[in-house]
Amino acid sequence: MVSPLTDSITSLLTKFLDVQSRRAEIVASNLANADTPGYVAKELDFADYMREAAREALSPTGSSTESKSFIQTPHVVEQTTGAVGIDGNTVDAGREMSTLAEAGTQYLAGTQLLQSRLRILRMAIREGR
Amino acid sequence: MSLFTIFQISSQGMTAQRERLETAAANLANSNTTRTEEGGPYRRRDVVFESVAVQDSTAANSSAFGNFFDSLEQPAEGVRAATVVGEQNAGVRRYQPDHPDADASGYVQMPDVDPLEETVNMISAARSFEANATAFNTAKEMARASLKLGDA
């Protein structure tokens, strides 16, 4: 039996929330170092990881334990585009603010989805009331 | 790593920017100071930022919801500000023979403070402070949203 607390969708949502909070953390790092000479802005490379996680969670036969080993965890990379400042700093405040807004909103969306799953569980416990 | 790391990083950022603002204020306030405790005119101060790795405040290095990022290759980076005193004084020499700090030929060595530069520094520090505050607030909203999961 699959519990709604441990099923593949809930597990996918927790991964999603982790990715978004990590993204926000990297943005916070970049913004804090916006005036540090020589600092190179970072970003999280998570697209492959999320795609793989979603494919696994949504495939009808896929079990969440089988293929976990070869999924690459998202990793921090240095931003490639962007102008280099006179002091070697590559933080683009506008870009960071938009990433921050995006990660924050995605995170809130993720919690909404997780909450609706918990609501379904609660409804089942209360026999539909 | 958790959302609380963002609080740590952003508050470090805000502290650093506040120090920068304080330094600019001190420089402006002393733009006409011709005598100091160490002798000679005031020498302008500057802050230099450097990034520092942030230790996770929580004992377990697990993420907020799972353990997916246990093997983080890079720790998050905060920031620290160090104050440096200007080495040589390149300030202007003003001819004012009646000034108590004037030298034998009647010139007074003024501090090397450029009001324009300090004002730009001040504005920049205030804006960067706001950026850090925004990141802090976003993290707060995120933490609040995850706390609300309980009352589904």
Image (tube, rainbow, N blue to C red):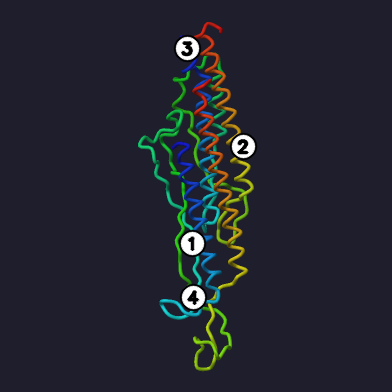
Which residue type carries mark 3?
A: Val
Residue furthest toward the top?
Answer: A127
Circles 4 and 3 on the same subunit: no
Answer whether labels 4 and 3 touch (C-beta < 8 Å): no
Residue at 45%, 45% in the rendered image: B8
Residue at 61%, 65% in the rendered image: B119
The disc numbered 4 marks a residue on which chain?
B
The disc numbered 1 marks a residue on which chain?
B
The earlier-in-sequence mark between 2 and 3 is 3
Residue furthest toward the bottom?
Answer: B105
Q: Nearer the viewer, mark 1 or mark 4?
A: 4
Question: Which residue, given by chain and number where applicable, does mark 2 sit on?
Answer: A102
Answer whether labels 1 and 3 touch (C-beta < 8 Å): no
Question: Which residue, given by chain and number where applicable, does mark 3 sit on?
Answer: A2
Distance (Cα) linking label 1 and label 2: 31 Å
Question: Which residue, given by chain and number where applicable, does mark 1 sit on?
Answer: B48
Q: Quadrant of the N terminus of chain B?
A: top left
Assign a secondary structure to mark 1: strand
Q: Nearer the viewer, mark 1 or mark 3?
A: 1
Q: Nearer the viewer, mark 2 or mark 3?
A: 2
Which residue type carries mark 2?
A: Glu
Distance (Cα) linking label 2 and label 4: 47 Å
Distance (Cα) linking label 4 and label 3: 73 Å
Front in this rendered view, residue B105 or A22: B105
Distance (Cα) linking label 1 and label 3: 55 Å
